[in-house]
Amino acid sequence: MKLTSSPPPFTFLGAPFVEADAKLLKERGTKAALLGMPYDMGGIWRTGTADGPRGLRDASRQYGPYFFDDDVDLLETFKLVDCGNAPMVPASPEKCRAAMKHGASEIIRSGATGIFIGGDHSIPIPIGQALSEATPGKIGYIVFDANMDAEEEVDGERFSNWSEACRLAELPNLDPKNMVMIGIRGSLNTRRQFEYVKSKGITVFAMRDIIELGIVEVMNRAIAIAGAGTDALYVSFDTDGVDAAYAPGTSGPEPGGLTSREIITAARMLGRHGVTIFDIVELCPAYDPSGITARLACYIIFNLLGASHAANGLQAR
């Protein structure tokens, strides 16, 4: 099976296309690399997230690389590249996961911040495996989501978008006590999942906690928990963690979630803290003709990278 990525019709922010190859990325001095994962065979609700990477790239064509908020040119400062998409093999989830893991591993081994665009919320399984194998120390994990995704299996299937939390909790160097879920709400969360999360010691900040405490306090606590004794941080942004009014282009829209300002605030705080890799998943352009969901996804990337730049004392102002 050919595991190399190939160039998309157009790239994110017009960034150069570079194959997901650790040697090539190191030679360019790449500090941030984006890889599409157009996979939705792990979804148990509506399909269409395979178009997420295309939707993000399409939305980015209205923007330039200069990000006013932090006075930074993202292409120049981060040597940002687009690695295209991990190759998908129709009707073979195993080969698709292998390709996603391979691409993620190459980016992680290059030392660049990996930006992975899905695709359904099962893609953290191969991404997490790649990070685990590349990290000699411990890993922390923060996820923004309406749902806990903590079913150990669904009709015998262990690799769906309802089970990624369980698979990540099984990684040898990811202690569930360093896992944090933010924005959980609604009736898609079963008692069985809640009992699993409690038994593992995973921290949950429900939407009512964010309403009562505020997003800044929740993020301060989340970063402290995920960062306690860890050497790498993986952040997953599920688009349904955001209120459906702000992000309708998702495979499982839920009311009552984070606002666009709150998710951007969270992204900025994570950027200032520093993340090893992050993903944006369940992006489903077909359900959002306005394109606002994909634009919000762009803003999450812009703000996380921009705040990271500012926190490292590189401000030009």
Image (cartoon, helix red, strand yellow):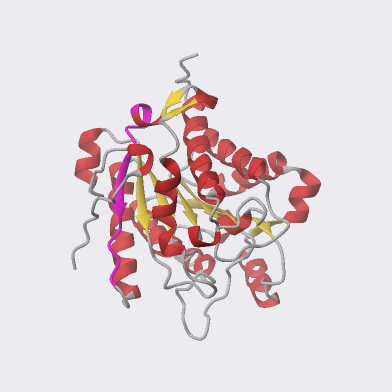
Where is residue 105 shown, x and y percent of the image?
Answer: 31, 54
Instruction: Please tell me which residue lies in front, 283 or 100.
Output: 283
Q: Eyeballing the image, is 167 above or below 263?
A: below
Left or right: residue 188 compared with residue 79: right
Query: Looking at the rendering, which quadrant does residue 260 occupy?
Result: top right
Where is residue 139 shown, x and y percent of the image?
Answer: 47, 52
Quadrant of the rendering where the N terminus is positioned: bottom left
- Indicate whether residue 39 is drawn in magenta: no
Q: Residue at x 78, y 45 (%)?
A: 213
Where is residue 17 shown, x and y percent of the image?
Answer: 26, 43
- Indicate whether residue 79 is drawn in magenta: yes
Q: Eyeballing the image, is 242 above or below 148?
A: above
Query: Looking at the rendering, which quadrant does residue 129 occupy?
Result: bottom left
Where is residue 114 shown, x and y percent of the image?
Answer: 38, 46
What residue range appears in magenta? Answer: 76-89
Left or right: residue 306 compared with residue 73: right
